[in-house]
Image (cartoon, rainbow, N blue to C red):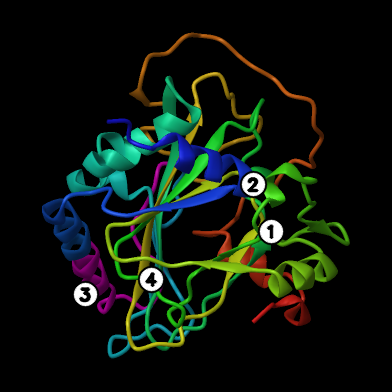
Amino acid sequence: MAALPQQEQDFFWQNGYLVVPDVVSQGALEQLHQTFQTWVEESRSYSENWGETLNGKPRYDLEPGHCADSPRLRRVNAPVEVSKAYFNVMADSTMTDCVAALIGPDVKLHHTKINSKQPGGETSVKWHQDFSFTPHSNDSVVTALLMVDEVNEKNGPLEVLAGSHVGPIHGLWHNGKFTGAIDDTIAAQCASKALTCTGPAGAVCLMHTRLLHGSKPNQSISPRTLFISVYSADDAVPLSPNPMPNRYEGLIVRGQRKGRVRSIDYAVDLPQLPDTASFFDQQAEHRDDAKIL
């Protein structure tokens, strides 16, 4: 049986996203959860970002307001480099098969990260398209957001504008500054029509790289943790440096490397790499009144 029935593939290409349940085993899911909880407990010992990734930036990113009594670990960069459990799920799971069904047969990794919203935190994600952060020669690029925790309407679920992946590519530069967020007026329009992507732990939201999306803060007492893996077709070649360089960039996870480049016609302003551990600081540069809550 195919990883994704044709009806579900058609839904993805029409809407730009698809939620699929049970893409990892219960045992693998428990390992992911336990590993992340270990990092949360470790974060209690730190008052600032720590660890180091390939580009020398911190691996573990703390939200403002973090403290030992109320830990707010919001980002882990390239977790597959420091966790076999996360690597295995990224490289060989039903999630990987689902991605291959959409952009295969030859699929490679671009980068991975964990985005987490701890209870009481204020982290939100302003509306944007991933493609403007990581432009490729073509847009056969899929972001897989695996729900390590249950994602519900209260704990800051992903919000999407269905069908926007076939629309224009929006700029993330404003007044000469790269803010990682789209124009306020367009963001307000997105928020008014947004759909939420919820599901049980172990489900994945597959998202087209050009889909407009954002999310609100966690307003519940439960954490919301997503393991995010960005994959591309083998013939999609990055056009700008990876904002999260890692030693597995370009790893073929399905099929084989063909040494072929496919290009499509589009134009986009190249992104600016973050100076800090994550793009949250770039989005903080966007005017406060641009926040869509």
Packing grade of label 2 (10 A; few <14, some 14-19, many >=20) is many
Residue 292 in the image, given as x and y percentages of width and height:
69, 77
Task: Tell me the kind of residue under disc 1.
Answer: Gly
- Residue at (36, 32) in percent of width and height: 248
Q: Which residue is mark 4?
A: 151
Q: CA distance from mark 3 to mark 2?
A: 31 Å
Q: Quadrant of residue 257?
A: top left
- Judge whether 204 appears above or below 216 on screen: above
For the point 58% across and 24% down, which residue is it?
236
Residue 139, position in %: x, y? 63, 33
Q: Which residues are magenta?
A: 36-54
Asked which secondary structure carries label 2, the reply is loop
Ranked by sequence position, the earlier of labels 1 and 3 is 3
Is disc 2 in contact with disc 1, using a CB cutoff of under 8 Å?
yes
- The amino acid beneath tag 2 is Phe
Q: CA distance from mark 4 to mark 2?
A: 25 Å
